[in-house]
Image (tube, rainbow, N blue to C red):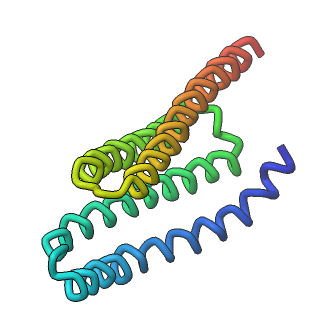
Amino acid sequence: MFAEHRAVGPLRIFLVVLFGLLVVLQVMSLPGQFAHMAEESPEFAYLRWPATAVSVFWVLCVQVVVVATWKLLTLVKHDRIFSEGALKWVDAIVWAIAAGWATLVGVLLYVGFNATDPGLPLLLFLLSVGVAVLGLLMVVMRALLRQATTLRTDMESVI
């Protein structure tokens, strides 16, 4: 458990940096990028607000994962990761990934039916598969956490 505790500090630093960059992306960069796109390509100006909303939502999903990871790290630090409280944070991660994936599939369908070139739909399909794999992996990790929590609870009741 010593190695896990040593990893918590650096991981938290990276999570703070990541969260800060996500806020900048969410508040400044994405809205500005889509405003610029609307000015430069008036034929795509109607996509400005939907693209901004979807992109900001995806960033929000990542922020939920970052916050839930922070909370799980707190549980690791206090040696309480194998508790029922940890499952709600893993559930938050699973639901954030699922929401982001569902939105990504919607974008894939919209782009796929309107594309003249297969490049972007293929890229979106690849991202959809990757996010689905990540989500399913988190479901498996949640099941493993539940089993470990049950085992630990059973062991504590025996002792």
- Closer to us: 121 or 105: 121
Q: Is residue 62 above or below residue 142?
A: below
Residue drawn 18% across and 70% down?
49
Does 124 sit above or below residue 102? below
Q: Residue at x 45, y 57 (%)?
A: 62
**From the viewer's perspective, is residue 110 above or below residue 34?**
above
Q: Is residue 119 left or right of residue 75?
A: left
Front one among 141 and 132: 132
State which quadrant residue 83 falls in.
Answer: top right
Label total for image: 0
The quarter in which the C terminus is drawn is top right
Q: Position of residue 2 (x, y in %)?
A: 86, 49
Which residue is depicted at the point 15% across and 76% down?
43
Q: What is the residue that sits farthest to the top in this orientation?
A: 158
Q: Quadrant of the N terminus?
A: top right
In the image: residue 122, left or right of residue 13: left
Seen from the viewer's position, the closer of residues 46 and 132 is 46
Q: Residue at x 49, y 53 (%)?
A: 65
Task: Pinpoint residue 35: horizontal percent, then vertical percent.
Answer: 24, 83
Query: Residue extending furthest front?
Result: 116
Q: Position of residue 87 (x, y in %)?
A: 51, 34
Q: Nearer the viewer, residue 98 or 83?
A: 98
